[in-house]
Image (cartoon, rainbow, N blue to C red):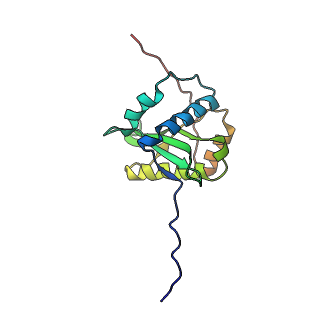
Amino acid sequence: MDHTPAAPPVRTPVRPARPEDLPRLVELIREHIAYERSASRPAGLADRLGPQLFAEGARMRVLLAESPDGAVAGYAACSAEFSFWDARHYLHMDCLYLAAEARGHGLGAALMEGVAGLARELGLDRVEWQTPDWNEGAIRFYDRLGATGRPKLRYALPVTD
């Protein structure tokens, strides 16, 4: 009989976000906004975001990356979308962000693996996303993963009464 102790289970660094993660997630979102040189967002982000993530039937899914000590260090936000030209659904990764101190330790690759797993879980065969053309580090990272880029500008049109 073998009395060798069983190896402890390997802890995955990626997991779905939970309601109690919302304050840290908002901190990371604010860091991401600053990193991408975007305009700040109005107060109340957590109040608006919580129901979109945690209400029954919520379309948006967020995966969190944890550092070895269990601290939330990054996120990927995704939702299923429909491609009119392809007449099929795909997983749109709206955001992927890792805190500066968490980069270079494999958490980005783990998040992307988690995103791909989420796509498979939802029965989707493709993930799409975008990144600013000046973000050379992200572009190199995505290229190393085997992703392909397509040049396109993204526009936004405010519609108010």
Quarter of the image with the C terminus is top left
Q: In the depicted view, which residue is nearer to us: 75 or 45? A: 45
Relative to 41, is 24 above or below? below
Instruction: Tell me residue 43's x, y (percent).
Output: 49, 23
Q: Residue at x 37, y 33 (%)?
A: 51
Relative to 132, is 42 above or below? above
Asked if residue 82 can be seen in this view, the reply is: no
Asked if residue 34 can be seen in this view, the reply is: yes
Q: Report the number of numbered marks.
A: 0
Which residue occupies the extreme top position in the image?
161
Relative to 3, is 119 above or below? above
Q: Residue at x 67, y 32 (%)?
A: 134
Instruction: Tell me residue 73's x, y (percent).
Output: 58, 45
Instruction: Tell me residue 50's x, y (percent).
Output: 41, 34
Instruction: Tell me residue 21's x, y (percent).
Output: 47, 42
Q: In the depicted view, which residue is nearer to us: 60 or 145? A: 60
Which residue occupies the extreme left position in the image?
56
